Image (spheres, rainbow, N blue to C red):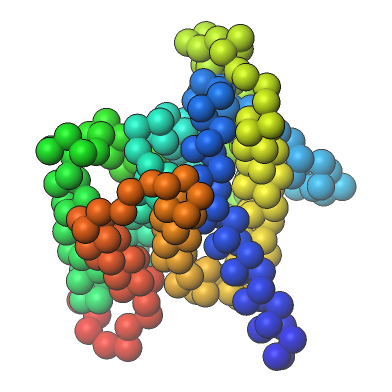
Amino acid sequence: MDKFFTRAMGLLLFLVVIWGVSWSIYKVALEFTPPILFAGIRSLLGGLMLGLVLLPSWKRIRWRENWRAYCVSALLNAVFFYGLQTMGLEYLPGGLFSVLIYFQPVLIGIFAWLWLGESMTALKITGLLAGFFGIAVISADSFGGALSVPGIILALLAAVSWALGVVFVKKVSDTVDSMWMVSLQFIVGGVILTAVGTVVESWTDIIWNTSYFIGLGFGSTLGIPVAFVIYFHLINRGEASKVAAFTFLVPLIAVLTGTFFLQEPVTYTLVIGLVLIVSSIYLVNRQPKKSKI
């Protein structure tokens, strides 16, 4: 039992680190590539690599029955989420952007209550209010010109898309294999993003240097297939609650990474907003003992 717990915690911390450092890595890579093409290629390669691992179980795909679910998930979790995320990183520091993206668990609380029939508790309401004020505090700087309003909007839209995608996947989880859902949503989404990028951007704008390849390589290996394999492994072994509880560490790691390696500024309002949003995510994911409403 102790060995299992230690191994699960090790995987969980590794997952959080992957998500936390990814923002700064992608931020650097985006200096050398158009955003939509970068999101598309990264998603497509990541989905294909995971698909190769899952190839022995290809019969579980059941494309004819599940193609609609794969396509909806691809739009929410790949096309909109990664597309909006990658474009938004051009407007905001990676640490701040990750803070706004990780408002997603709060949104999941709302959507799961509305569409999955999950309970809404007093603790969750407190968390939602804390998250709202955290977003308001962070956004306050943008009206003074310190931060980008389009960047904040793109981050929040990406969080909404991701939250809807998670709720949708949970809703169809009884009929679709979860691992193939991850692979195919990124393959389909990657194809769409790459096609859109080919039309509205230019491949000649990509600078094929070390920073670009590091970002692309990280995203298509650790960022998508490895991270999601760990994620679903932990869920399947009964560690979903720990994954949810520990996601609040991701924006903290992202902010620290951006500060130490990219010299991104840390303002008082960012710190206050960060504390409120982290508190929000913790409260929304915490299992209360009482006060169900």
As drawn, 277 above or below 172: below
Q: Is 75 in front, or is 57?
A: 75
**Which quadrant is the N terminus positioned in?**
bottom right
Q: Is residue 88 left or right of residue 5?
A: left
Residue 116 position, x and y percent, is 38, 59
Q: Is residue 120 left or right of residue 140?
A: right
Q: Going 60% across and 56% down the picture, which residue do you hit?
A: 18
| Quadrant of the drawing holding the C terminus | bottom left
Q: Is residue 121 left or right of residue 208?
A: left
Task: State the image quarter where residue 217 is shown.
Answer: top right
- Residue 169, image x, y percentages: 52, 50
Residue 233 vs 70, above or below: the answer is below
Q: Is residue 6 visible?
A: yes
The residue under the point 31% across, 54% down is 266
Q: Residue at x 28, y 66 (%)?
A: 275
Reply above or below: 251 against 80. Answer: below
